Amino acid sequence: MSSKAVKPNKLVFKGDKDKKKKKRKHHHDSDARNDADALNNEGWVRADSLDDLVGPLFITHPSDPPICITTDKENRLLAYPLPELAENTKPEPVIVEQVIVGARLVGTTNSFTFKSCTGKYLGSDKFGVVTCDSEAISGQEEWNPAITEAGIAFQNVHGKYLMVDEIANGGFKIRADAEEVGFCEAFRVYCQARFKHKNKSEKKKALPAGAAEIDNIRKYQSWGAGRIHTTKEDERELKRARQEGRAAEAMLDRRAKVKADRYCK
């Protein structure tokens, strides 16, 4: 006698129909949406708010030629010339020394620190000398960025602004002794797309009183086989209730007057 277990037959009643197996659908739309989101989260985009300054940054200036802030192995801050780019092409860092990491100081809204790839902080003294060799944060390593029409300006603790200064040999030098914000003090900052601050979705506009009532009925009506039943009472009472902040209560009362609804009791 075979020891193999015999699977019991399924109990079938007269008149039962065979159930067809459902084929699994491939979610091409969701896959395409995910691919699009992944593409949108790649690369570098222009920072246009203070919240965008948290994370890896690429700080450039539209001088002639354009430059970007770069650190070297000796923790010196340099104005490195950018290569020529095709039209409508955004600049991106090509070496890790061109990436500066921004962080908001705890308990503040407008105070930031900026750290190089070697872990040293960007700072400036009262004479405007900019360095990037500090391992700890003090007042000289604090910056207050400001959003302007031309770009982002960086103010130090002494009230002076970071600037790009052209020197005699045709190069550029980074200083922090500008009194006001002008062209030389306005930087173009880029952040990684995946770290860019996403604004909260705007609140939906309030529906008219009648439309809001119908939407409420569709959501909560437990009878009528899908048919919408509304009261014939004047909608002006509903508008008045909305102004007084009791719209939900008024809609419940109006539903209760149409017919018995278990969710109205």
Image (tube, helix red, strand yellow):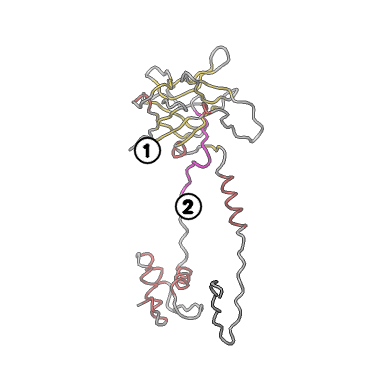
Q: Name the residue nearer the viewer: 214 or 109.
A: 109
Residue placed farthest to the front in the image? 1
Q: Which residue is mark 2?
A: 201
Q: Which residue is mark 1?
A: 109
- Tell me the element at label 2: loop
Residue 232 horizontal/vertical position (percent): 45, 79
Magenta stretch holds residue 241: no
Residue placed farthest to the top in the image? 168
Quadrant in which the N terminus appears: bottom right
- The residue under label 1 is which amino acid type? Thr
Residue 201 horizontal/vertical position (percent): 47, 52
Magenta stretch holds residue 193: yes
- Tell me the element at label 1: loop
Point 34% across, 37% down: residue: 106
Point 38% across, 26% down: residue: 141
Point 63% across, 35% down: residue: 89
Quadrant in which the C terminus appears: bottom left
Q: Eyeballing the image, is 121 above or below 49?
A: above
For residue 138, which quarter of the picture?
top left
Q: Residues within 10 Å of mark 2 (few under 14, many from 20)?
A: few
Q: Name the residue nearer the viewer: 97 or 256.
A: 97
For residue 29, which quarter of the picture?
bottom right
Residue 169 horizontal/vertical position (percent): 57, 12
- The residue under label 2 is which amino acid type? Ser
As measured in the structure, the alpha-carbon distance from the residue carrying label 2 to the one carrying label 1 is 22 Å
Locate residue 100 relative to residue 248 in the image: left or right: right
What residue span does the magenta drawing correspond to? 186-199
Residue placed farthest to the bottom in the image? 14
